[in-house]
Image (cartoon, helix red, strand yellow):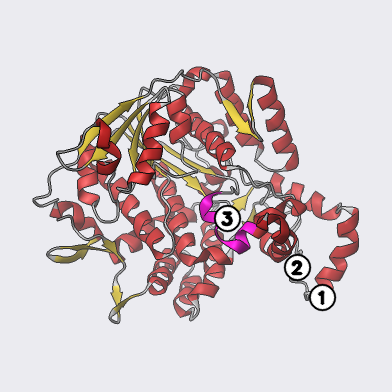
Amino acid sequence: MAHSGVVFPEVDGRRSTSALGRAVVADALRGVDPVGAQAAERETNWRQGYLDHFRRLVEAGLLRDGEAALDVARAGLESLHTRMRSATEEGEVPLAEVFAAGTGAVPPLETATVRGTGERALELSIPLHGERLGGDALHRQLDRWVAAGSMEPSAAEAVREVVAHPEWLDLRDQKLVVLGAGAEMGPLRAVLSWGGEVVGVDLPRPDVWHRVLGVAAGSAGTLHLPVAGSTWSASNLAAHAGGDLVHDLPRLADWLGSLDGPLVLGNYVYADGATNVRVATAVDALSVELLRRRDDVALAFLATPTDVFAVPREAVEFSTRAYRAPSAAMRVARPALRTVSGGRLLRRNYAPGSDPGLNDSLVPQQGPNYALAKRLQRWRATVARRDGVTTSLNVAPPTRTRSVVKNRALASAYAGAHRFGIEVFEPATSNTLMAALLVHDLRTGGDQGDASAGGTAAPWEEEARGAVHGGLWRTAYDPRSALGLAVVLGLGSART
């Protein structure tokens, strides 16, 4: 029997996600912001109060010319790995010991391979509103996205480089491990269409694998996947495919460790609620273990735009101009709305002149577990870059994924967001665009600092480079101060 999984630690006889989140944030802050650490520890209502403390993690990271972010990341990761547990048949062990415990009598996972029979796409094209944009049409769309403030200019430049180097798209020289093979935001479909080699890992759920196997068979690429048991065949593959990162971590580590490389370990996992922290922690433990075992592993992540980021001066100036030149309707409505709300609605996104600015797009409805799972990925990217690991982390745009639109408040906010200069992308557009940025990072060495500046960029600058934030960084208004209005304005269209 497989070990029974990555679990939260017991505190006073129960497994509390709030206690874990509070402790990890406090530990991350303690070395650079002891007052902030104490405030996090004393927070009595973590589910509502977490917003301020997650913002403070980024503010504290800007100390010492932004280098304090590395201390925050290292301390946060160490805290999480020290506190989280793995439940085995022999009892609970610290997370790091789960790999030493091994897989017991469970037979190792085997590898199935599906080779697609489709035609390879030889140049980059991005689906948008029912069309595929390539060449000049794609360049014009990139111009429009930059002009609208939907992406940073560095993101458009990176995509243009990929357009200019179509040979980069062919990733057969490395294996892209897509953890979360069925994820809407993952690069599996795009990379397979370019003829690449993909290693797919997702839960052992036949419905997920029927879909993924169908994509692979019709593509020009090659898909490798883990299979359990000895009775599988091509005809019943979906019933035997998959592996559970939370419950079967040592076996997946052994399987991935045995594959020919080089490997790009791509983290596209998502789960609801507290399970999201468990699976994010499992992936992080897997990443550390594979980096320990092999010297040919790169890391890839997508950052959520609904988080806190330090942003470049240019984004602040764009936002400031937008605030000073509202639409005619907003010029009439804004003073009244600000008065009625006691100044809570439609606040400025930044103090003019901030450099860097601090964009706080955390959404309370997504909750502290989501925030911790996503922040953990940013911490790992920060540490891995400084350890010399090729790392791709790009901010992905707000996207109408299934997990977002099933939350009615978020679905309504997304439907009304365009009134405030926020563009919400369709999944096919987002995942192809982000796959192109991943290709750029892999072909140019990842976010290994700004060589043109003759040194290494600060962690916040590495995160900001190539960001496709949908306008959250450049809108006139602090996103949370417009969220309630966006929900109201979007209610009708979200229902339809």
- Name the dominant secondary structure of the magenta segment: helix
**Residue 340: mark in rendering:** 1
Label ID, residue 276: none
Is residue 470 placed above or below 340 in the rendered structure?
above
Q: Pick whichever, 368 or 269, lies toward us.
A: 269
Q: Kindly identify the amino acid type of the residue bearing the numbered disc 3.
A: Val
Nearer the observer, disc 1 or disc 3? Answer: 3
User: SS of the residue at dot 2?
Assistant: loop
Residue 430 position within the rendered picture, expressed as x and y whole percent measured from the top left: 57, 40
Residue on which disc 2 sits:
345
Above-or-below relation of 32 to 186: below
Mark 3 crowd level (few <14, some 14–19, many ≥20, 10 Å Cα)? some
Q: CA distance from mark 2 to mark 1?
A: 9 Å
Going by the numbered disc 1, the residue's amino acid type is Val
Quarter of the image with the C terminus is bottom right
Q: Secondary structure at mark 1?
A: helix
Q: CA distance from mark 3 to mark 2?
A: 24 Å
Mark 1 Cα-neighbour bin, 10 Å: few <14, some 14–19, many ≥20: few
Query: Is 273 left, or right, of 206 in this rendering?
Result: right
- Residue 387 seen by the camera: no
The dot on residue 405 is 3
Marks 2 and 1 close (CB-CB < 8 Å): yes
Q: Which residues are magenta?
A: 401-411
Where's residue 329, x and y in %? 89, 57
Disc with the residue nearer the chain's start (1 vs 3):
1
